[in-house]
Image: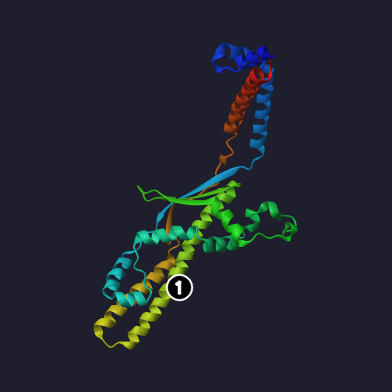
């Protein structure tokens, strides 16, 4: 009995293993290894064919440049800063405006509004939507928070610090929908910011006109008239300019190739995994479970 135990211990000593012995063991069990490789490769192929395909649409844009009138307005307003601030006149820099515009695209309120306006709920949650009857399955309509999370996960926006170019990316399971959503997002945020600017500027003009009726100082009236004139021009510009926040350089088109799944890579790694697992199984079985 003691002799057999010593023999087992001898088998377990790693310094007794050599490449030639391992090669012989693997060669003698090549069929078993092949079965494992075929199984894992088949599972990889099955997974790659059944997993949902994702397509990426891309919009390239730059911040829309402000008119020279805006610079003149900032100069005038800076001399009458207190009143301009009370009137709600925006004298922020182009950089801060750009940051605000980018943040709005990813904001919950804008995203929720965009989903409702474009009727995207049945598209985002297509698995829960009965297309024929136009109703939700089990009468369970997704809530706004789930819709926001789904959309937020599909949309990304980034800026190239070297060129100043802004990239808006939408990943979707349908290439045409991906391109449509990407282009619609840019159009919607431009319209949202334009309408917001018109609304705020209109309030500012009303405030300034009220102030005009209260003062008799010619110098103050002159400054107020100039600010009102510039604000009026600002509204006119906003009404005629569609690309208010972002100017599109290259709009999104329906992508031809999917970004995932990478079927060739999945099959290759499945084959590699099967080879490793098969070899390990054969060696472990030989050295630790056979006398």
Give the residue number, with chain letter if any, for mark 1: 199
> Looking at this view, is 282 or 49 the one in front?
282
> Looking at this view, is 212 or 277 the one in front?
277
24 vs 211, left or right, is right
Is residue 236 in view? Answer: yes
278 vs 167, left or right, is right
State which quadrant residue 14 falls in: top right
Residue 254 x %, y %: 55, 46
Which residue is pictured at 51% across the width and 57% down the height?
185
State which quadrant residue 92 falls in: bottom left
Residue 115 x %, y %: 58, 60
Quarter of the image where the C terminus is located: top right
SS of the residue under disc 1: helix
Quarter of the image where the N terminus is located: top right
Residue 2 x %, y %: 67, 14
Neighbour tally class for label 1: few under 14, some 14-19, many 20 plus, Cα within 10 Å = few
Which residue is pictured at 55% across the width and 51% down the height?
154
Residue 35 x %, y %: 69, 23
């Amino acid at each position: 009995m003691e002799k057999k135990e010593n023999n087992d211990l001898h088998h377990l000593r790693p310094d007794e293993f050599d490449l030639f012995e391992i090669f012989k063991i693997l060669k003698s069990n090549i069929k078993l290894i092949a079965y494992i490789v075929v199984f894992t490769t088949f599972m990889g192929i099955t997974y790659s064919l059944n997993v949902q395909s994702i397509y990426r649409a891309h919009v390239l844009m730059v911040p829309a440049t402000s008119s020279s009138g805006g610079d003149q307005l900032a100069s005038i307003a800076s001399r009458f800063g207190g009143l301009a601030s009370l009137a709600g006149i925006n004298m922020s820099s182009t950089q801060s405006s750009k940051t605000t515009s980018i943040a709005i695209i990813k904001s919950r309120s804008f995203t929720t509004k965009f989903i409702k306006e474009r009727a995207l709920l049945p598209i985002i949650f297509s698995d829960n939507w009965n297309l024929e009857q136009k109703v939700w399955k089990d009468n369970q309509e997704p809530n706004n928070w789930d819709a926001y999370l789904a959309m937020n996960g599909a949309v990304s926006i980034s800026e190239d610090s070297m060129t100043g170019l802004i990239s808006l990316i939408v990943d979707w399971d349908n290439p045409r929908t991906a391109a449509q959503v990407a282009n619609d997002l840019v159009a919607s945020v431009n319209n949202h910011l334009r309408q917001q600017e018109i609304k705020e500027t209109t309030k500012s003009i009303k405030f300034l006109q009220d102030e005009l009726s209260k003062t008799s100082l010619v110098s103050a009236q002159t400054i107020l008239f100039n600010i009102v004139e510039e604000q009026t021009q600002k509204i006119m510009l906003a009404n005629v300019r569609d690309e208010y926040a972002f100017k599109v350089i290259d709009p999104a088109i329906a992508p031809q190739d999917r970004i995932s799944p990478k079927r060739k890579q999945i099959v290759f790694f499945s084959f590699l995994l099967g080879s490793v697992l098969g070899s390990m199984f054969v060696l472990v079985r030989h050295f630790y479970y056979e006398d």
